[in-house]
Amino acid sequence: MSPVNAYIVIPCYNEEEVLEETCRQLLSVFDEMKTQKLINDDSRIIFVDDGSKDKTWEIIDRFSDEYVEIGGIKLAKNAGHQNALLAGLMTVKDECDCAISIDADLQDDIHVIPEFIKNFQNGCDVVYGVRSKRDTDTFFKRTTAVAFYKLMQAMGVKMVFNHADYRLMSRRALNALSEFSEVNLFLRGLVPLVGYKSANVYYERNERFAGQSKYPLKKMLSFAFDGITSFSITPIRIITAIGASVSFMAILAALYVLFSKFFGNASVGWSSLMVSIWFLGGVQLLSVGLIGEYIGKIYKETKRRPRFIIEEYKK
Ligand code: UDP
Ligand code: MG
Protein backbone atom coordinates (compact mmCIF):
# COMPACT_ATOMS: atom_id res chain seq x y z
CA MET A 1 0.00 0.00 0.00
CA SER A 2 1.30 3.45 -0.77
CA PRO A 3 2.27 5.76 2.10
CA VAL A 4 -0.46 8.19 3.16
CA ASN A 5 -0.27 11.88 3.82
CA ALA A 6 -1.09 12.03 7.51
CA TYR A 7 -1.33 15.07 9.74
CA ILE A 8 -1.26 15.06 13.51
CA VAL A 9 -3.16 17.90 15.14
CA ILE A 10 -2.42 18.88 18.74
CA PRO A 11 -4.33 21.58 20.64
CA CYS A 12 -2.09 23.26 23.22
CA TYR A 13 -3.02 25.60 26.02
CA ASN A 14 -0.19 26.68 28.31
CA GLU A 15 1.79 23.57 27.53
CA GLU A 16 5.35 24.94 27.62
CA GLU A 17 6.37 22.24 30.07
CA VAL A 18 5.43 19.34 27.85
CA LEU A 19 5.94 20.62 24.31
CA GLU A 20 9.60 19.77 23.82
CA GLU A 21 9.16 16.19 24.96
CA THR A 22 5.92 15.83 22.99
CA CYS A 23 7.69 17.06 19.88
CA ARG A 24 10.59 14.69 20.36
CA GLN A 25 8.33 11.68 20.83
CA LEU A 26 6.04 12.53 17.93
CA LEU A 27 8.98 13.06 15.61
CA SER A 28 10.40 9.69 16.51
CA VAL A 29 7.06 7.98 15.79
CA PHE A 30 6.95 9.94 12.54
CA ASP A 31 10.40 8.69 11.54
CA GLU A 32 9.41 5.13 12.34
CA MET A 33 6.28 5.40 10.22
CA LYS A 34 8.27 6.85 7.35
CA THR A 35 10.73 3.95 7.38
CA GLN A 36 7.77 1.57 7.48
CA LYS A 37 6.38 3.41 4.45
CA LEU A 38 3.12 4.12 6.26
CA ILE A 39 3.26 7.88 5.78
CA ASN A 40 4.86 10.03 3.12
CA ASP A 41 7.19 13.01 3.34
CA ASP A 42 4.38 15.55 3.11
CA SER A 43 2.99 14.42 6.45
CA ARG A 44 3.01 17.04 9.18
CA ILE A 45 2.66 17.58 12.90
CA ILE A 46 0.56 20.69 13.52
CA PHE A 47 0.37 22.34 16.93
CA VAL A 48 -2.57 24.63 17.59
CA ASP A 49 -1.79 27.28 20.17
CA ASP A 50 -5.09 27.99 21.87
CA GLY A 51 -4.26 31.50 23.05
CA SER A 52 -1.67 30.36 25.59
CA LYS A 53 -0.30 32.85 28.09
CA ASP A 54 3.08 31.15 28.45
CA LYS A 55 5.84 30.40 25.94
CA THR A 56 3.85 27.76 24.05
CA TRP A 57 3.79 29.70 20.79
CA GLU A 58 7.48 30.61 20.96
CA ILE A 59 8.31 26.94 21.28
CA ILE A 60 6.02 25.96 18.40
CA ASP A 61 7.47 28.75 16.29
CA ARG A 62 11.00 27.61 16.98
CA PHE A 63 10.21 23.98 16.19
CA SER A 64 8.49 24.81 12.95
CA ASP A 65 11.62 26.65 11.82
CA GLU A 66 13.78 23.78 12.91
CA TYR A 67 11.87 20.83 11.45
CA VAL A 68 10.03 20.69 8.13
CA GLU A 69 7.56 18.21 9.59
CA ILE A 70 6.33 20.66 12.22
CA GLY A 71 3.89 23.48 11.74
CA GLY A 72 1.80 25.70 13.98
CA ILE A 73 -1.49 27.52 14.06
CA LYS A 74 -1.93 30.35 16.54
CA LEU A 75 -5.44 31.22 17.62
CA ALA A 76 -6.12 34.86 18.38
CA LYS A 77 -7.49 34.00 21.81
CA ASN A 78 -8.34 31.05 23.99
CA ALA A 79 -11.17 29.27 22.26
CA GLY A 80 -11.26 26.10 24.36
CA HIS A 81 -10.03 22.60 23.67
CA GLN A 82 -12.82 21.53 21.31
CA ASN A 83 -12.71 24.70 19.23
CA ALA A 84 -8.92 24.65 19.04
CA LEU A 85 -9.02 21.08 17.86
CA LEU A 86 -11.65 21.87 15.25
CA ALA A 87 -9.64 24.88 14.09
CA GLY A 88 -6.65 22.62 13.52
CA LEU A 89 -8.61 19.91 11.75
CA MET A 90 -10.47 22.34 9.48
CA THR A 91 -7.25 24.13 8.57
CA VAL A 92 -5.45 20.98 7.50
CA LYS A 93 -8.32 18.98 6.03
CA ASP A 94 -7.65 19.88 2.41
CA GLU A 95 -3.92 19.19 2.65
CA CYS A 96 -4.00 15.70 4.09
CA ASP A 97 -5.43 12.23 3.47
CA CYS A 98 -6.21 11.84 7.13
CA ALA A 99 -5.70 13.74 10.38
CA ILE A 100 -5.06 12.37 13.86
CA SER A 101 -5.97 14.44 16.88
CA ILE A 102 -4.18 14.00 20.18
CA ASP A 103 -3.65 15.97 23.40
CA ALA A 104 -0.35 17.74 23.97
CA ASP A 105 0.41 15.86 27.18
CA LEU A 106 0.68 12.50 25.35
CA GLN A 107 -1.48 10.75 27.92
CA ASP A 108 -2.71 8.76 24.96
CA ASP A 109 -0.25 6.19 23.70
CA ILE A 110 1.25 7.49 20.47
CA HIS A 111 2.63 4.07 19.61
CA VAL A 112 -0.76 3.02 18.29
CA ILE A 113 -0.70 5.73 15.62
CA PRO A 114 0.73 3.24 13.05
CA GLU A 115 -2.27 1.05 13.81
CA PHE A 116 -4.58 4.03 13.18
CA ILE A 117 -2.96 4.50 9.78
CA LYS A 118 -3.20 0.81 8.92
CA ASN A 119 -6.93 0.88 9.69
CA PHE A 120 -7.25 3.94 7.48
CA GLN A 121 -5.43 2.15 4.67
CA ASN A 122 -7.86 -0.73 5.07
CA GLY A 123 -10.78 1.54 4.36
CA CYS A 124 -11.82 3.02 7.71
CA ASP A 125 -12.75 6.69 7.66
CA VAL A 126 -12.75 7.09 11.42
CA VAL A 127 -10.49 5.29 13.88
CA TYR A 128 -11.28 5.78 17.56
CA GLY A 129 -8.57 5.47 20.18
CA VAL A 130 -10.17 3.70 23.12
CA ARG A 131 -8.67 3.39 26.59
CA SER A 132 -8.52 -0.21 27.67
CA LYS A 133 -7.73 0.65 31.28
CA ARG A 134 -7.90 3.69 33.46
CA ASP A 135 -5.38 2.59 36.07
CA THR A 136 -3.34 5.74 35.83
CA ASP A 137 -6.27 8.08 36.31
CA THR A 138 -7.13 9.16 39.81
CA PHE A 139 -10.08 7.39 41.43
CA PHE A 140 -12.03 10.60 41.12
CA LYS A 141 -11.37 11.12 37.41
CA ARG A 142 -12.13 7.49 36.68
CA THR A 143 -15.47 7.35 38.47
CA THR A 144 -16.65 10.70 37.18
CA ALA A 145 -15.66 9.71 33.64
CA VAL A 146 -17.53 6.40 33.79
CA ALA A 147 -20.56 8.14 35.30
CA PHE A 148 -20.42 10.65 32.46
CA TYR A 149 -20.42 8.00 29.72
CA LYS A 150 -23.26 6.15 31.45
CA LEU A 151 -25.29 9.35 31.76
CA MET A 152 -24.74 10.26 28.12
CA GLN A 153 -25.86 6.78 27.15
CA ALA A 154 -29.00 7.14 29.26
CA MET A 155 -29.68 10.43 27.52
CA GLY A 156 -29.55 8.68 24.17
CA VAL A 157 -26.29 10.22 22.93
CA LYS A 158 -24.28 7.80 20.84
CA MET A 159 -20.68 7.89 22.01
CA VAL A 160 -17.77 5.48 21.93
CA PHE A 161 -17.18 4.34 25.51
CA ASN A 162 -13.84 5.46 26.95
CA HIS A 163 -12.88 7.35 23.84
CA ALA A 164 -11.81 10.96 24.19
CA ASP A 165 -10.45 13.06 21.39
CA TYR A 166 -7.72 10.71 20.25
CA ARG A 167 -8.84 9.64 16.82
CA LEU A 168 -8.06 9.52 13.13
CA MET A 169 -10.41 10.98 10.56
CA SER A 170 -10.12 10.68 6.81
CA ARG A 171 -10.37 13.74 4.64
CA ARG A 172 -13.91 12.92 3.62
CA ALA A 173 -14.93 12.38 7.23
CA LEU A 174 -13.44 15.79 8.03
CA ASN A 175 -15.37 17.30 5.15
CA ALA A 176 -18.53 15.76 6.53
CA LEU A 177 -17.68 17.10 9.97
CA SER A 178 -17.30 20.57 8.50
CA GLU A 179 -20.99 20.43 7.51
CA PHE A 180 -21.95 20.49 11.16
CA SER A 181 -22.13 24.17 11.84
CA GLU A 182 -23.06 24.11 15.51
CA VAL A 183 -21.33 26.44 17.87
CA ASN A 184 -21.51 24.33 21.02
CA LEU A 185 -18.90 21.81 20.03
CA PHE A 186 -18.79 18.38 21.53
CA LEU A 187 -16.68 16.48 19.04
CA ARG A 188 -16.90 13.02 20.52
CA GLY A 189 -20.67 13.18 20.17
CA LEU A 190 -20.52 14.63 16.66
CA VAL A 191 -18.04 12.26 15.04
CA PRO A 192 -20.26 9.18 15.40
CA LEU A 193 -23.02 11.20 13.68
CA VAL A 194 -20.77 11.57 10.64
CA GLY A 195 -20.98 7.84 10.06
CA TYR A 196 -18.72 5.98 7.62
CA LYS A 197 -16.80 2.85 8.44
CA SER A 198 -14.97 3.08 11.74
CA ALA A 199 -12.68 0.98 13.89
CA ASN A 200 -11.50 1.02 17.50
CA VAL A 201 -7.88 0.81 18.52
CA TYR A 202 -7.21 0.03 22.18
CA TYR A 203 -4.40 1.50 24.25
CA GLU A 204 -3.47 2.20 27.84
CA ARG A 205 -3.57 5.74 29.05
CA ASN A 206 -0.51 7.20 30.73
CA GLU A 207 -0.19 9.87 33.34
CA ARG A 208 0.47 13.43 32.31
CA PHE A 209 4.28 13.54 32.37
CA ALA A 210 4.52 17.26 33.15
CA GLY A 211 2.33 20.28 33.62
CA GLN A 212 -1.18 20.30 35.01
CA SER A 213 -4.53 19.22 33.70
CA LYS A 214 -6.29 22.05 31.91
CA TYR A 215 -9.58 20.49 32.90
CA PRO A 216 -10.32 21.31 36.52
CA LEU A 217 -13.58 20.03 37.99
CA LYS A 218 -15.48 23.16 37.04
CA LYS A 219 -14.52 22.85 33.36
CA MET A 220 -15.20 19.12 33.43
CA LEU A 221 -18.71 19.64 34.74
CA SER A 222 -19.49 22.34 32.25
CA PHE A 223 -18.09 20.15 29.46
CA ALA A 224 -20.34 17.29 30.53
CA PHE A 225 -23.34 19.60 30.82
CA ASP A 226 -22.59 20.98 27.36
CA GLY A 227 -22.36 17.49 25.98
CA ILE A 228 -25.77 16.55 27.33
CA THR A 229 -27.58 19.72 26.41
CA SER A 230 -26.06 19.84 22.92
CA PHE A 231 -27.12 16.35 22.03
CA SER A 232 -30.18 15.44 23.93
CA ILE A 233 -33.62 16.79 24.72
CA THR A 234 -34.16 14.03 27.25
CA PRO A 235 -34.01 16.55 30.15
CA ILE A 236 -37.02 18.35 28.63
CA ARG A 237 -38.82 15.03 28.27
CA ILE A 238 -38.14 14.33 31.95
CA ILE A 239 -39.94 17.56 32.90
CA THR A 240 -42.91 16.57 30.76
CA ALA A 241 -42.97 13.17 32.44
CA ILE A 242 -42.82 14.72 35.91
CA GLY A 243 -45.63 17.08 34.90
CA ALA A 244 -47.76 14.17 33.79
CA SER A 245 -47.16 12.23 36.99
CA VAL A 246 -47.86 15.26 39.20
CA SER A 247 -51.11 15.83 37.33
CA PHE A 248 -52.01 12.22 37.93
CA MET A 249 -51.17 12.64 41.60
CA ALA A 250 -53.44 15.70 41.64
CA ILE A 251 -56.34 13.41 40.86
CA LEU A 252 -55.38 11.13 43.73
CA ALA A 253 -54.97 14.14 46.00
CA ALA A 254 -58.41 15.37 44.96
CA LEU A 255 -59.94 12.03 45.86
CA TYR A 256 -58.16 12.03 49.22
CA VAL A 257 -59.22 15.60 49.94
CA LEU A 258 -62.85 14.90 49.06
CA PHE A 259 -62.76 11.81 51.25
CA SER A 260 -61.39 13.83 54.21
CA LYS A 261 -63.91 16.60 53.62
CA PHE A 262 -66.89 14.30 53.86
CA PHE A 263 -65.66 11.68 56.33
CA GLY A 264 -62.85 13.31 58.23
CA ASN A 265 -62.66 16.68 59.88
CA ALA A 266 -60.85 18.81 57.28
CA SER A 267 -60.52 22.50 58.16
CA VAL A 268 -62.30 25.07 56.10
CA GLY A 269 -60.40 26.02 52.96
CA TRP A 270 -57.91 23.16 53.20
CA SER A 271 -59.58 21.00 50.55
CA SER A 272 -59.71 23.62 47.84
CA LEU A 273 -56.14 24.72 48.61
CA MET A 274 -54.74 21.20 48.42
CA VAL A 275 -56.46 20.37 45.16
CA SER A 276 -55.41 23.65 43.55
CA ILE A 277 -51.77 23.26 44.57
CA TRP A 278 -51.45 19.78 43.13
CA PHE A 279 -53.47 20.48 40.06
CA LEU A 280 -51.79 23.76 39.19
CA GLY A 281 -48.33 22.28 39.90
CA GLY A 282 -48.98 19.44 37.52
CA VAL A 283 -50.45 21.64 34.82
CA GLN A 284 -47.53 24.07 35.08
CA LEU A 285 -44.91 21.37 34.80
CA LEU A 286 -46.70 19.84 31.85
CA SER A 287 -46.87 23.22 30.15
CA VAL A 288 -43.19 23.90 30.75
CA GLY A 289 -42.42 20.50 29.27
CA LEU A 290 -44.63 21.22 26.26
CA ILE A 291 -42.97 24.57 25.63
CA GLY A 292 -39.67 22.76 26.11
CA GLU A 293 -40.59 20.35 23.32
CA TYR A 294 -40.93 23.27 20.94
CA ILE A 295 -37.72 24.83 22.16
CA GLY A 296 -36.10 21.44 21.62
CA LYS A 297 -37.30 21.52 18.02
CA ILE A 298 -36.08 25.07 17.50
CA TYR A 299 -32.77 24.11 18.96
CA LYS A 300 -32.43 21.17 16.61
CA GLU A 301 -33.30 23.42 13.68
CA THR A 302 -30.86 26.15 14.61
CA LYS A 303 -27.98 23.69 14.68
CA ARG A 304 -28.49 23.13 10.95
CA ARG A 305 -26.90 19.75 11.10
CA PRO A 306 -26.59 17.98 7.77
CA ARG A 307 -29.56 15.71 7.26
CA PHE A 308 -27.53 13.11 5.41
CA ILE A 309 -23.99 12.36 4.37
CA ILE A 310 -23.51 10.49 1.12
CA GLU A 311 -20.96 7.74 1.19
CA GLU A 312 -21.03 6.71 -2.50
CA TYR A 313 -22.72 7.74 -5.71
CA LYS A 314 -22.35 5.26 -8.51
CA LYS A 315 -23.43 6.23 -12.00
N1 UDP B 1 -6.51 22.56 25.82
C1 UDP B 1 -6.74 23.59 24.89
N2 UDP B 1 -7.47 24.68 25.29
C2 UDP B 1 -8.02 24.78 26.54
C3 UDP B 1 -7.81 23.72 27.46
C4 UDP B 1 -7.06 22.63 27.07
O1 UDP B 1 -6.26 23.54 23.77
O2 UDP B 1 -8.67 25.81 26.81
C5 UDP B 1 -5.71 21.39 25.40
C6 UDP B 1 -4.56 21.02 26.31
O3 UDP B 1 -3.42 21.78 25.99
C7 UDP B 1 -4.38 19.56 26.02
C8 UDP B 1 -5.80 19.08 25.74
O4 UDP B 1 -6.54 20.26 25.44
O5 UDP B 1 -3.60 19.32 24.86
C9 UDP B 1 -6.40 18.30 26.88
O6 UDP B 1 -6.21 18.99 28.12
P1 UDP B 1 -5.75 18.24 29.44
O7 UDP B 1 -4.69 17.24 29.12
O8 UDP B 1 -5.39 19.27 30.43
O9 UDP B 1 -7.08 17.49 29.87
P2 UDP B 1 -7.21 16.10 30.70
O10 UDP B 1 -6.32 15.11 30.04
O11 UDP B 1 -6.78 16.42 32.10
O12 UDP B 1 -8.67 15.76 30.59
MG1 MG C 1 -4.45 15.29 29.55
Image: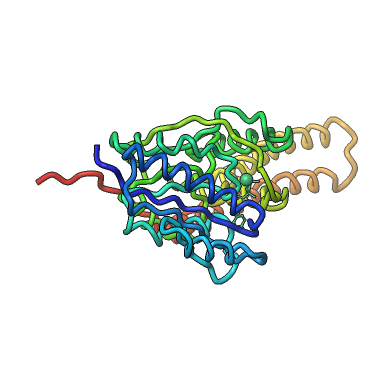
Q: In the image shown, does 192 or 36 lie closer to the viewer? A: 36
Task: Give percent across and percent down for residue 281.
Answer: 70, 48
Give above or below for 25 relative to 69.
Answer: above
Farthest bottom residue?
Answer: 76
Task: Give percent across and percent down for residue 124.
Answer: 32, 37
Q: In the image shown, does 7 or 170 lie closer to the viewer? A: 7
Q: Residue at x 9, y 46 (%)?
A: 315
Colouring method of the image: rainbow
Res 148 visible: yes
Tag count in the figure? 0
Q: Residue at x 72, y 52 (%)?
A: 218
Give above or below for 117 relative to 46.
Answer: above
Task: Give percent across and percent down for residue 212.
Answer: 71, 50
Task: Give percent across and percent down for residue 118.
Answer: 34, 35
Farthest left residue?
Answer: 315
Q: Residue at x 57, y 31 (%)?
A: 204
Q: Quadrant of the N terminus?
A: top left
- Where on the image, by quarter, is ligand 2? top right
Give above or below for 166 relative to 295.
Answer: above
Res 308 visible: no
Q: In the image shown, does 1 or 250 lie closer to the viewer? A: 1
Occupied quadrant, residue 31: top left
